[in-house]
Image: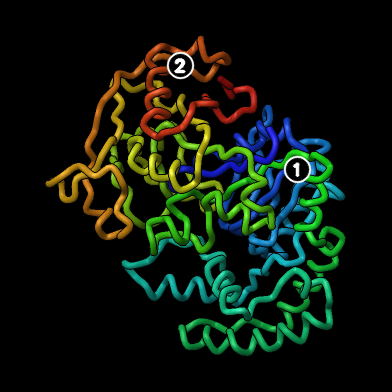
Amino acid sequence: MSNTILVGSQWGDEGKGKIIDVLTGGVDIVVRSQGGNNAGHTIVDGDKKYVLHLIPSGILRKGKICVIGNGVVIDPVALVEEIQGLRKRGIKVDKNLLISDSAHLVMPYHRSIDERREALKGKNKIGTTKRGIGPAYGDKAARTGLRMADLIRPEVFKQKLALRIRENNAVIKSLGGKPVNGAKVLADYIAAAKVLKPFVTNTVTYLHKAMESKKEILFEGAQGTFLDIDHGTYPFVTSSNTTSGGACTGSGVAPNRIDEVIGVVKAYTTRVGEGPLPTEEEVIGDMLHNMGREFGSTTGRARRCGWFDAVATRYATMVNGVDVMAITNLDGLDGLEEIRICTGYRIDGKGPVLDTPPTDAGELARCRPVYTSMPGWLTPTDSIRKYKDLPVKARRYAETLAKLSGAKLAIVSVGPGRDQTIHL
């Protein structure tokens, strides 16, 4: 492994945190390059469970450096809480964490605007986590955002914040919301700045010097391909580039320095929030929920569930340049006699078979899956540690998913634990 990007090839929640945690053992640096604390990566280490929102998953491994890149939007108060929570559990957070001075801030007025806009959409809501991520990226694009470099300079921050509070409170009032208290925001963020200042640096320079020193870097994607602002099921997407290209712009590492892209998929399909999900079926959702599976690590919401969608994952392989695939949650299908795989779409169930997802969300919502079926293996797989020991039907299923998706199968996960990871 050298410089590797790991991305979700579905709608997020593919189990990227677990795979990142496993792969971190072979790298020097783990980089988060987009998103905010609307994402959650769950890692299980023995009997301990960790849910990380902003800090890269590598923080749980000794001797690894974690970088929050310039493409991430950071809620400083939430980040301090995450750091303190890890420290209370005996996890070192010191010189092993670096934060980009160019990363933009998520402010309380962003959350208020997010909440009000979502409420006003009514039945047309997007399903946002209401954590202010979209409005924060909106300010970044409008060139009115505040950054970490501002936060760690109190006088500069105070002046810039006053203007932003005034402007955004006017927006909040127009949306029917309650204005934020500027004095409280200033006090809370200055307190957070004191904790975060030692971590803040030019991470672009750091990463390039690290590469010159032959350090190996793993880029940790958040969310999934079909939540990408450009390539996802717009408008039911997040506000950042969740595809592999976002790892480059969000970290300052050029594309020609990337050696491999790993795409992570579940053995079935899930999604949180609104928007089309062509293979969604209650039968598989009810089964997984009754097993205690598929509840969001950030929101706690029950995830929508469906059969594996090879049309979507083929497209994700193309957009991301996926070289190898990691399949997670294979054990979730252990009890099924028959497993369906979507190999194509028909709009309204009629006409020619589509092998590429429509870019229009409304048209995608009209797509009906064309399925093929495979026999289940009806054998528990969670205790299996070698690929050759998996049931033949389970191996055939995993290999079929990889073939249909256009990537080489590299990893199969049969549970949340580190040791429940099978390398081919």
Label 1 to label 2: alpha-carbon separation: 35 Å
Label 2: element kind: loop
Identity, as a three-letter code, of the amino acid under mark 2: Pro
Classify residue 147 as left or right of residue 224: right
Q: Is residue 322 above or below residue 192?
A: above
Residue 53, given in percent of the width and then of the height, sits at 64, 52
Residue depicted at 78% across the width and 45% down the height: 211
Outermost residue, left direction? Answer: 350
Classify residue 365 as left or right of residue 85: left
Is residue 290 visible from the viewing direction of this image? no
Residue identified by numbered label 2: 380
Quadrant showing the N terminus: top right
Identity, as a three-letter code, of the amino acid under mark 1: Ile
Count of number-bearing discs: 2
Q: Which mark is residue 271?
A: none
Q: Along the line of sight, which residue is nearer the eye, 228 or 43?
A: 228
Is residue 417 visible from the viewing direction of this image? yes
Residue depicted at 84% across the width and 64% down the height: 197
Q: Along the line of sight, which residue is nearer the eye, 164 or 255?
A: 255
Residue identified by numbered label 1: 29
Q: How is the image coloured?
A: rainbow
Q: Is residue 309 above or below residue 54?
A: above
Quadrant showing the C terminus: top right
Badge 2: how crowded within 10 Å, few (<14), some, or many (20+)?
some
Residue depicted at 54% across the width and 73% down the height: 138
